[in-house]
Image: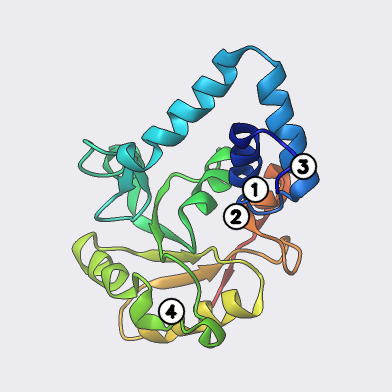
Amino acid sequence: MHKYPGSLQATIDALSLLPGVGPRSAERYAYYLLKNNPTKARQIASSLANLHDSITFCPVTFALIEKGEDQSPLYTNPKRDKTIVAVVAEPFDIYPLEDTGQYTGTYHVLGGLLSPIVNIGPDNLHIKELINRIKTDNVKEIIVATNASVEGESTALYLQNAVSHLSIEMSRLARGLPIGIDLAYADQITLGRALEGRTKL
């Protein structure tokens, strides 16, 4: 039997589904929403309700876009250099690179990293689409911007082999990124230096 009223318990249970949110944190969040102006709770509920209906993936870069947009603005913007492509694992890896203000190329989201342990192989990633883009956009350089992890390194090596028959330059973010860190948690200075000091593969 739950110790809280049903609606409050349901909110606690829902918040507990979020990664990194334990039972006590979920209780604090739920109580905060309950005791404050109901507008905040309604705003959060509304944004969550619209999330899946409003967001989709760019058919070219696989970045997140609003439904109704044909392609990512980071791809269609004429100021972006389509001949340079930063390859990232997940859509959210794009934003810290953008925050450096030093990158003017485009992006390609793989949708994950190679990981035999969880059955993620090349066919589960957007690698074929990347190779098609290299040909379509006359790409001159691929910047492999995957995490400095075993999976990230394995994916970088696979990509290097997959495009070895093409006349393009490949580089990797410099080792200014600490081992094991996710791009989403790297600071802008570290990322900026990593972009500047990227190394050829």
Separation of residues labelled 2 and 4 (CA atoms): 18 Å
> Which image quadrant is residue 122 in?
bottom left
The circle on residue 5 is none
Q: Is residue 31 left or right of residue 87?
A: right
Separation of residues labelled 3 and 4 (CA atoms): 41 Å
Separation of residues labelled 3 and 2 (CA atoms): 37 Å
Residue 22 in the image: x percent, y percent?
75, 51
Is the C terminus in the top left, top right, bottom left or bottom right quadrant? bottom right
Residue found 42% across the figure and 84% down from its top: 121
Q: Which residue is mark 1?
A: 192
Q: Which residue is mark 4?
A: 159
Q: Is any part of residue 196 visible from this angle?
A: no
Q: Earlier in the sequence, mark 1 or mark 4?
A: 4
Separation of residues labelled 1 and 4 (CA atoms): 23 Å
The circle on residue 195 is 2
> Which image quadrant is residue 74 in?
top left
Label 4's element? helix
**Which label lies toward us, 1 or 4?**
4
The circle on residue 25 is 3
Q: Amino acid at mark 3?
A: Ser
